[in-house]
Image (spheres, rainbow, N blue to C red):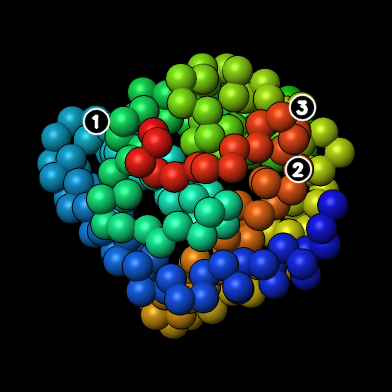
Amino acid sequence: MKTRAELKAMAKEQIKGNIGPLFIVTLVIGGISFLAGLVLGMIPFGSLILSLVVIPAFSLSTLRIYLALVNNRQTPEAKDAFSGFDDFWTAFKTTFLTGLFTFLWSLLFIIPGIIKGYSYSMAMYIVAENPGISALDAIDRSKKMMDGHKMELFVLYLSLYGWALLTVITLGIAGIWTIPYMNATLANFYNEIKPQETVYAEVTPEQF
């Protein structure tokens, strides 16, 4: 298992030369999400549609983009922002079920809910790499994959907190670099802990 420093060093190297394309893709996703929020906000249950349909699909697109980047050094294109909509139903179900299961565990105590949230955290990555997989199967694989790695991910999140704070303080300007850096680091973490039989040498957004 690579150290946090190694995962971050890999991420810095992987995003080098790709900041511009990654910024464009992030801008496309952010812009459309914002506009969708304005439009859907004017209709009943619009916010629910945004959070359960639009955002999960864009989240899936983002994970596919970064997996393609860290695995194959593939430079993203604007059209890659929409790759998640090819499997938006699975993205929706995965987001809904992980949220539901986390909430139900939180009804017992807050801590079990947080722990389960980490257990389910790799489910969408698994969906990104396995077209056709069911949401429940992805969640089950995530639980097995995260066994023994939840604290590692927690500490990794903590180590990235400063970069997230910098993004907020600079009103998103620093995010041009920090967002790709954090996303690439987390994609590297996923690659590091996933079982070897799930490694795909040629993962690109066009495959989904």
52 horizontally vs 95: left or right: left
133 horizontally vs 208: left or right: right
**Tag 3: amino acid:** Lys
Q: Secondary structure at mark 3?
A: helix
Which of the labelled discs sits on residue 193, or is there none? 2
Please name whichever residue, 92 or 114, is drawn nearer the observer in this view of the structure.
Answer: 92
Q: Secondary structure at mark 2?
A: helix
**What residue do we see at 28% from left, 44% from top?**
82
Which of the labelled discs sits on residue 144, or is there none? 3
**Residue 104 seen in the current view:** no
**Residue for badge 1:** 45
Which of the labelled discs sits on residue 205, or is there none? none
Mark 1, Cα crowd under 10 Å, few <14 / some 14-19 / many 20+, is few
Which of disc 2 and disc 1 is earlier in sequence?
A: 1
Please name whichever residue, 186 or 166, is drawn nearer the observer in this view of the structure.
Answer: 186
Mark 2, Cα crowd under 10 Å, few <14 / some 14-19 / many 20+, is some
**Tag 1: amino acid:** Phe
The span from disc 1 to disc 2 (Cα, nearest Å) is 38 Å
**Tag 2: amino acid:** Ile
The span from disc 2 to disc 3 (Cα, nearest Å) is 10 Å
On-image quarter of the C terminus: top left
**What residue do we see at 51% from left, 75% from top?**
16
